[in-house]
Image (cartoon, grey):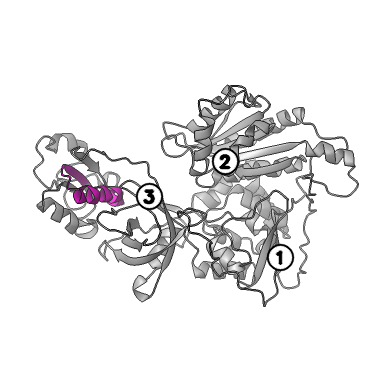
């Protein structure tokens, strides 16, 4: 590996456990064949449904603790698991997030539909001991709805719960860990009572570093280029695993240059993709890190960005990351896969503490990864939105000795971002348009915080050459009336108008009238998105438009909207507006 000057290619750190093929964690030789047989029966399956990565992070934490207790452990997204095999599993932990208004995450939708089939026998899971950990936000009405419903359903199918369902809350001062920490203590007490450790084996000490999930083998300098796109035998419907490289044809700023907010109307050419969508659907875009951040990261870790490598799983049943080519370069890994701009989680500091050769840095890392240090970690990371790259800068002696094989354990992959589609195929064939606000804000850190995807998209210049963006379409949760004569009232302040623009374009192309749109922003002259388009539709009789510009007038407040709006006889553009300042801004 490439490390600090004077360091050998072999990482010298804390004792490292090894994982034999049968899945038993041992720290030396001499395990008897009887122990191997006993250990092979101690299997734990961890299934997660995760939208933003928090549930996956919790699932991987449970896996690490299971390996310390000598379980043969497997972690999979619920939709990647063959659900028909669930009837053969004896010990399963489910980690499920709740999204939106009580919806399951995207990567457990198929499992969710299957597990609630009415024809499943009530004794289907009678051999299974299970536990459910839910992750949610108590500010939403359907707090942890998915975990509660899943727990109840597994019980109906004959499963034996080890513990009551755990309900992690993002609103808690300590986040979900306030529930996860004590729940895990209870979980292992119950699990070890049912599946005790074999004679002669104890729980691995916290001082022992577990091996990485993947071995990273560098190739000779003259190896084939791993950054070349792999050819596919056939083009499937674009998806997260096989996104479509769409040509960006327009990247237009639609706010005034003097306006504080940079908002873009971006158009992609999807000719040949086979993708179809309707109003209310979303486009998923896979972003990448900036070249400047990639260069900084490689310098910090003393890595050659052009070095090529192949990955090998450390356990037989472990799949390779689907989003990485084989072979691959360090530059491709950091640019397209490692989310070095995300706010690091507790597990990041825990792994770094094992790798640290510096006493002071290790002490701080251990504090951040302890239950007692979560308030300080929140102040250091979450409140100022400090990025993973910035955190690595703060621990230089540790950062420069990170073995490359641990990078995929240390840093999560870049997740796709969802944008409401702001166009209709009927009005713009073979095109997708989005209305995107470029995310930038200040915290107590000197450098402004920037959104990874919006900053990357805004930086692209299609007028200077071909620009390709990986994307795919997903069904949205917003449904519009199917009957042509059904009138619609749409309320879309700011960039929230995007799906309604798609709906209006679709309905106008079909000759439908009865479209009523409420739009609000700060100033008519600075951020009235699609103004000319709306006014043209008003003239043609396809649209009734009501506007609210919160910085242009102060005669009325939004609190009086029921009194001043002529609901029964709309007569045109309503421009009475807010005097309540920032808290009443229509663009929010």
Indicate the position of residue 507 as horizontal and vertical percent values: 22, 47
Please, what secondary structure does the residue beneath circle 3 have?
strand
Pointer 2 local density, CA inside 10 Å: few below 14, some 14–19, many at least 20: many
- Between the residue at mark 3 and the residue at mark 1, the CA separation in whole angstroms equals 39 Å
Structural distance between the alpha carbons of marks 3 and 2: 22 Å
Q: List x then y, in percent, for residue 379.
A: 53, 49
Does dot 1 land on a helix, a strand or a loop? strand
Q: Position of residue 176 (x, y in %)?
A: 55, 38
* Residue bearing the label numbered 1: 217
Magenta span dominant secondary structure: helix
Q: Is residue 533 left or right of residue 3?
A: left
Q: Is residue 201 visible?
A: no
Quarter residue 49 falls in: top right
In this image, 50 relative to 462: left or right? right
Residue 529: image quadrant is bottom left
Q: If you read the primary sequence from the N terminus, does the residue marked by circle 2 or circle 1 appear first? A: 2
Whether 232 is among the magenta residues is: no
- Quick one: quadrant of the N terminus? bottom right
Camera-side residue of 59 and 386: 59
Q: Vertically, is 584 above or below 298?
A: above
Which region of the structure is painted magenta?
Answer: 494-518
Q: From the viewer's side, name the closer residue of 146 and 323.
A: 323
Question: What label does residue 282 carry, if any?
Answer: 3
Q: Residue at x 50, y 59 (%)?
A: 234
| The disc label shown at residue 78, or none | 2
* Rendered position, 87 above or below 550: above
Mark 2: which secondary structure? Answer: helix
Q: Is residue 469 visible?
A: yes
């Amino acid at each position: 590996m490439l490390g600090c000057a004077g360091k050998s290619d072999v990482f010298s750190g804390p004792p490292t456990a090894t994982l034999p093929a049968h899945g038993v964690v041992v720290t030396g030789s001499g395990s008897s064949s009887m122990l191997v047989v006993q250990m092979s029966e101690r299997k734990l399956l961890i299934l997660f449904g995760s939208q933003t990565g928090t549930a996956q992070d919790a699932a991987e934490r449970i896996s690490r603790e299971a390996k310390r207790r000598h379980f043969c452990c497997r972690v999979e997204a619920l939709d990647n698991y063959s659900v028909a095999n669930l009837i053969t599993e004896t010990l399963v932990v489910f980690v499920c997030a709740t999204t939106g208004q009580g919806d399951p995450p995207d990567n457990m939708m198929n499992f969710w539909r299957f597990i609630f089939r009415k024809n499943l026998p009530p004794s289907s899971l009678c051999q299974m001991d299970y536990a459910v950990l839910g992750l949610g936000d108590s500010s939403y009405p359907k707090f942890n709805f998915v975990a509660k419903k899943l727990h109840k359903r597994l019980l109906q199918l004959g499963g034996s719960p080890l513990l009551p369902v755990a309900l992690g809350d993002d609103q808690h001062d300590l986040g979900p860990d306030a529930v996860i920490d004590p729940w895990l203590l209870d979980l292992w007490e119950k699990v070890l009572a049912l599946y005790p450790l074999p004679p002669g084996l104890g729980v691995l000490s916290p001082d022992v570093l577990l091996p990485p999930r993947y071995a990273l083998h560098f190739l000779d300098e003259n190896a084939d280029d791993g950054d070349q796109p792999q050819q596919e035998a056939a083009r499937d419907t674009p998806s997260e695993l096989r996104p479509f490289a769409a040509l960006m044809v327009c990247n237009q700023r639609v706010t005034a240059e003097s306006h504080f907010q940079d908002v873009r109307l971006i158009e992609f050419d999807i000719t040949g993709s086979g993708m179809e969508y309707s109003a209310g659907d979303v486009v998923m875009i896979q972003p990448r890190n900036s070249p400047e951040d990639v260069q900084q990261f490689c310098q910090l870790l003393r890595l050659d960005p052009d070095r090529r490598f192949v990955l090998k799983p450390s356990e037989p049943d472990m799949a390779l990351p689907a989003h990485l080519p084989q072979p691959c370069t360090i530059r491709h890994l950091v640019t397209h896969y490692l989310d070095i701009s995300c706010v690091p989680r507790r597990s990041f500091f825990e792994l770094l503490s094992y790798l640290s050769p510096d006493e002071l840095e290790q002490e701080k890392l251990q504090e951040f990864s302890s239950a007692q240090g979560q308030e300080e970690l929140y102040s250091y990371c979450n409140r100022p939105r400090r990025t993973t790259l910035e955190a690595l800068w703060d621990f230089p002696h540790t950062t420069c000795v990170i073995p490359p094989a641990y990078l995929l354990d240390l840093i999560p992959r870049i997740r796709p971002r969802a944008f409401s589609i702001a166009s209709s195929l009927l009005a713009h064939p073979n095109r997708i348009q989005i209305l995107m606000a470029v995310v930038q804000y200040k915290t107590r850190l000197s450098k402004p915080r920037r959104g990874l995807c919006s900053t990357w998209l805004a930086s692209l210049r299609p007028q200077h050459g071909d620009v390709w963006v990986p994307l795919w379409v997903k069904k949205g949760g917003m449904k519009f009336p199917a009957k042509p004569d059904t009138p619609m009232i749409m309320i879309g302040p700011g960039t929230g108008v995007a799906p309604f623009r798609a709906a209006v374009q679709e309905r106008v192309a079909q000759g439908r009238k009865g479209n009523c749109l409420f739009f609000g922003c700060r100033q008519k002259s600075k951020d009235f998105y699609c103004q000319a388009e709306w006014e043209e539709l008003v003239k043609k009789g396809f649209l009734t438009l009501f506007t609210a510009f919160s910085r242009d007038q102060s005669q009325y407040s939004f609190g009086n909207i029921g009194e001043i709006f002529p609901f029964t006889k709309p007569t045109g553009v309503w421009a009475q507006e807010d005097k309540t300042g920032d808290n009443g801004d229509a663009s929010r």
